[in-house]
Image (spheres, coloured by chain):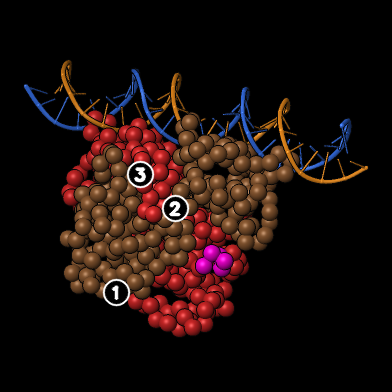
Chain colours: A brown, B red, C orange, D blue
DNA sequence: CACACATTGTGAAAAAAAGCACATTCAATC
DNA sequence: GATTGAATGTGCTTTTTTTCACAATGTGTG
């Protein structure tokens, strides 16, 4: 199966499929490191907590990667998934809002390892501007965002401002020419429909847990 | 509609509904602050980027909160959603792995505001043990987790270790008596089926964006 | 107190996603 | 080179989730 085939994607791919592909790649990295040459859909499914048919169907949207009677070659499959998810490229990120979360993200090794490189960090607070971060970046004033984004070819903008500052941060990013935004604040931001927006509200899952804790069993909250 | 009714939950509630309830509460807080007495499902839907019928149906799983011809009283609706999600209680959290992300989470104001309070922080690295954090907590050795968890009635355990340390962290938490785990690492951890586990892989959304960037438009990645 | 108007709550339809089950195809073995 | 065994790829079924559309029910007004 050719790369061009990977890239064409004729039928519509379900959104959950994309998210799972990324999940599949995690244990595949482990298997590669451990030296397993092949993996079956069943084993991979167990490792990811999903259904084996799901694994096969997800992959089938992009081509035929398996060998019947054997399974998938770990190395090849990982390469294919990386090509699909474009993790085999390098992506340039910039970030707005250098609070605790922002600082944690720019230092994050997982991002770096997958090719997501922070090339600029901004903050609206002038007291933070000029500060040198451990990753080597210096906090820039938001006034300079347009120049820096176009000069460094930023692909994705990350928002880690306060909730109130999120919309303004998004506006600044879009105005500066960034076409994709990842919003870590709980605020619902609106951007031009020609751009991509993903929200990552790190508090949502906590609320999920709390909901289930109060129901299913007679768990008691701390008084 | 009575609270008991809120709490009974006769039919099965779809999982996406729970997640959306938390999303609804965000703009409701803003509306309350702004002094809007009522909100229609249509307006709330726009603010959250969903379908109006979705909003009404989600709420309908738990009772009748609206006034026909008028909409929902903001204050009452927020109170109801908080009761459903159990955000009107106080939840005790502990955290394992005090790297950059862990440190960011314990200081996070949004968590605190919603009643999620970190009462203990652990790290396997003895060089970090004893360190005093800005939030007032002191990093504890993992050896003491069992005592502390039972003494402080920890409801939820948060994992922010390295990928490799995640499973061990989960085991420690479960062994210490924690029944709910929120895993921030990309590792797939396995726990007893009588416990709750939520995964929050903060890199997944990034991979989603990259995927769409390479497809829909002819976007170019940085070389 | 009737009437106009707005918006809810909900059954039924549509769409999307997940899972089953099996024919197909490949590797391995004798 | 036929045969066995294993695991893929996929059409079809089932389940879940979303959306539609409208009857029901409330508010506000004259």
Q: Nearer the viewer, residue A222 or A174?
A: A174
Question: Magenta part of the protein: which range?
Answer: B162-166
Mark nearer the N terminus (2 vs 1): 2
Q: Mark 2 = which residue?
A: A89
Q: Residues within 10 Å of mark 2 (few under 14, many from 20)?
A: some
Q: Nearer the viewer, residue B171 or B62?
A: B171
Q: Are marks 2 and 3 on the same chain?
A: no
Q: Mark 3 = which residue?
A: B219
Horizontal relation, residue B68 to residue B176: left or right: left
Q: Which callout, 2 or 1, points to the residue nearer the camera?
A: 2
Q: Mark 1 = which residue?
A: A132
Q: Is residue B131 placed above or below B22 in the rendered structure?
A: below
Q: Quadrant of the C terminus of chain B?
A: bottom left
- Is residue B128 in view? yes
Q: Residues within 10 Å of mark 1 (few under 14, many from 20)?
A: few
- Is residue B107 in view? no
């Amino acid at each position: 199966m050719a790369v061009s085939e990977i890239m064409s994607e004729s039928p519509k791919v379900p959104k959950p499929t994309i998210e799972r592909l990324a999940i599949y790649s995690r244990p595949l990295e482990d298997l590669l490191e451990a030296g397993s040459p092949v993996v079956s859909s069943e084993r991979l499914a167990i490792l990811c907590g999903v259904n084996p048919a799901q694994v096969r169907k997800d992959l089938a949207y992009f081509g035929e990667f398996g060998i019947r009677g054997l399974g998938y070659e770990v190395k090849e499959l990982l390469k294919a998934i990386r090509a699909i998810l474009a993790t085999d490229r390098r992506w340039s990120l910039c970030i707005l809002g250098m609070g605790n979360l922002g600082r944690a993200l720019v230092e994050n090794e997982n991002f770096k390892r997958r090719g997501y490189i922070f090339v600029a960090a901004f903050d609206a607070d002038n007291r933070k501007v000029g500060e040198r971060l451990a990753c080597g970046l210096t906090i820039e004033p938001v006034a300079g965002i347009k120049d820096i984004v176009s000069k460094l070819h930023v692909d994705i903008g990350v928002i880690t401002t306060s909730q109130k500052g999120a919309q303004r941060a998004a506006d600044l990013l879009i105005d500066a020419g960034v076409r994709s935004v990842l919003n870590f604040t709980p605020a619902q931001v609106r951007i031009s429909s020609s751009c991509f927006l993903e929200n990552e509200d790190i508090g949502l899952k906590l609320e999920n847990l709390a909901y289930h804790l109060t129901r299913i069993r007679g768990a008691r909250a701390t008084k």
